[in-house]
């Protein structure tokens, strides 16, 4: 424990050390506990653990020391009381909904959500009696109008993927609370290194750990962070019962990822800023969506609310799908994959990949056009990323 007068540890110190408990071997790096179950000293102890009279591990679907270390570290970075690790980012979204809501409840959600979250809300939740009203991310009066007596949750992603739209979290939080609802923010694109939604009034933070928390494109995982009752009891209760829990190995990879999160996010921001500025000057590009550019409609809010603009840059080329595919196919270094938040830069055509399985109407609402290309700018030299994109863009203009 820290002494009273000592200031709380800084962000990067928490990123390197929070949640670390050494075993008797006094190892310096966090150990991995790949065990399905834990043993008891006696039948009486087993009974006490199962009855909840004695704290401690029972089974890795309930708790696991490596997963707990990751959760404590992420909670310390987001400023939350509790965190639950999940098998994927989608499992985090699902567990939030099924852990907190019941049949008859209503969600107000932004149309600018990750494509699979849109599908989950549209195709699956209504089967269980949970229905969703869709609103444009930054149309605040639409959020207010959509909320009713059954509304329990406001759900938004800011900044959004792929267009980097930015919503005022404080404003959404106060509207959600006025409506008697909770605000959940998917903080995947910023990570706590750039934005901490709980400090701005959000109740729940959702992560796909698959992205920047890992940072090297290795493991699938997710997390929900928030208060002890909702996250520590209700959502954790759902996860330990239904089973979409995080694997200890993946937790260990994410735990290592968090140690370098702040350094990596700084580099992603810097590289993406350079690439976005270059794209904006290119004649084959009709529009660039990066909130770090002063002409992005949400530049000022993003500058205020975030400590960086992130690593995702989208741009539109003249000539629709054909031109966009030509750009992608002409690159040689960028990885053609829908993943983001990797050290390797990636390039994708959202309309036919991440946003391919939703309706045209939903794609239009999300602003995902046929000419849109999304890149996740990695940690390579930005000059090499630009050179690779130049190859693609000159192909798109036929030059
Ligand atoms: C990838 C992603 C998800 C889903 O995460 P998985 O780990 O792929 O299940 C949710 N939200 C956002 C913003 C994402 O980018």
Image (cartoon, grey):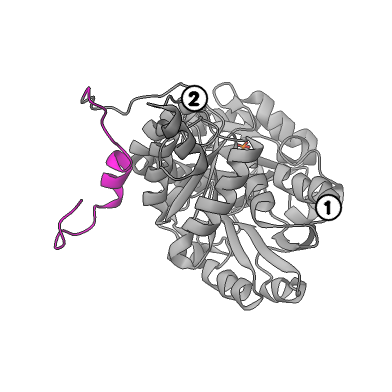
For this rendering, which residue is in front, 92 or 187? 92
Q: Is residue 205 above or below residue 63?
A: below
Q: Residue at x 40, y 27 (%)?
A: 42
Residue bounds of the magenta highlight? 1-25
Q: Which residue is mark 2?
A: 37
How many numbered circles does the render carry?
Answer: 2
**Cβ of disc 2 within 8 Å of ligand 1?**
no
Check whether the beta carbons of the residues at disc 1 and disc 2 lie within 8 A of each other: no
Q: Residue at x 62, y 45 (%)?
A: 238
- Does 2 appear in magenta? yes
Q: Secondary structure at mark 1?
A: helix
Q: Residue at x 43, y 33 (%)?
A: 44
Sequence-wise first label, 1 or 2: 2
- Does 239 appear in magenta? no
Question: Which of the labelled discs sits on residue 126, or is there none?
Answer: 1
For this rendering, which residue is in front, 23 or 293? 23
Q: x, y (%) of residue 38?
A: 44, 26
Measured Cα–Cα span from mark 1 to mark 2? 36 Å
- View extreme (front): residue: 44
Could you tell me what secondary structure mostly forms the magenta stretch?
A: loop
- Between disc 1 and disc 2, the foreground one is 2
Q: Pick the quarter of the image with the C terminus.
A: top right
Q: Secondary structure at mark 2?
A: loop
């Amino acid at each position: 424990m820290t002494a009273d007068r000592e200031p709380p540890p800084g962000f990067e110190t928490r990123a390197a050390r929070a949640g670390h408990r050494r075993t008797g071997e006094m190892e310096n790096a966090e150990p991995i506990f790949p065990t399905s179950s834990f043993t008891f000293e006696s039948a009486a102890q087993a009974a006490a653990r199962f009855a909840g009279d004695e704290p401690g591990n029972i089974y890795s679907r309930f708790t696991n020391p490596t997963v707990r270390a990751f959760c404590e570290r992420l909670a310390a970075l987001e400023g939350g009381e509790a965190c639950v690790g999940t098998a994927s980012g989608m499992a985090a979204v699902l567990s939030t909904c099924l852990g907190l809501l019941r049949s008859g409840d209503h969600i107000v959600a932004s149309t600018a959500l990750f494509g699979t979250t849109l599908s989950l809300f549209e195709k699956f939740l209504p089967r269980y009696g949970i229905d969703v009203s869709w609103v444009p991310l930054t149309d605040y009066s639409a959020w207010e109008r959509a909320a009713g007596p059954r509304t329990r949750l406001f759900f938004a992603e800011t900044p959004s993927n792929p267009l980097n739209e930015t919503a005022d979290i404080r404003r959404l939080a106060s509207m959600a609370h006025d409506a008697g609802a909770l605000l959940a923010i998917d903080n995947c694109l910023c990570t706590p290194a750039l934005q901490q939604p709980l400090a701005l009034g959000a109740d729940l933070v959702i992560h796909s750990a698959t992205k920047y928390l890992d940072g090297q494109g290795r493991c699938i995982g997710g997390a929900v962070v928030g208060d002890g009752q909702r996250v520590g009891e209700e959502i954790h209760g759902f996860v330990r019962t239904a089973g979409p829990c995080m694997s200890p190995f993946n937790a260990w990879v994410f735990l290592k990822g968090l140690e370098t999160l702040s350094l990596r996010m700084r580099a992603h921001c810097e590289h993406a800023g350079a690439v976005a500025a270059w794209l904006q000057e290119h004649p084959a590009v009709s529009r660039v969506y990066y909130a770090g550019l002063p002409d992005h409609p949400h530049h000022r809010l993003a500058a205020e609310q975030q400590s960086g603009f992130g690593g995702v840059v989208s741009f539109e080329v003249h000539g629709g799908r054909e031109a966009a595919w030509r750009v992608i196919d002409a690159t040689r270094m960028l990885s053609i994959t829908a993943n983001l938040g990797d050290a390797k830069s990636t390039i994708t055509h959202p309309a036919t990949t991440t946003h391919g399985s939703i309706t045209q109407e939903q794609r239009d609402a999300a602003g995902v056009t046929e000419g849109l290309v999304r890149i996740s700018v990695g940690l390579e030299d930005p000059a090499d990323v630009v050179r690779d994109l130049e190859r693609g863009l000159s192909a798109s203009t036929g030059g």
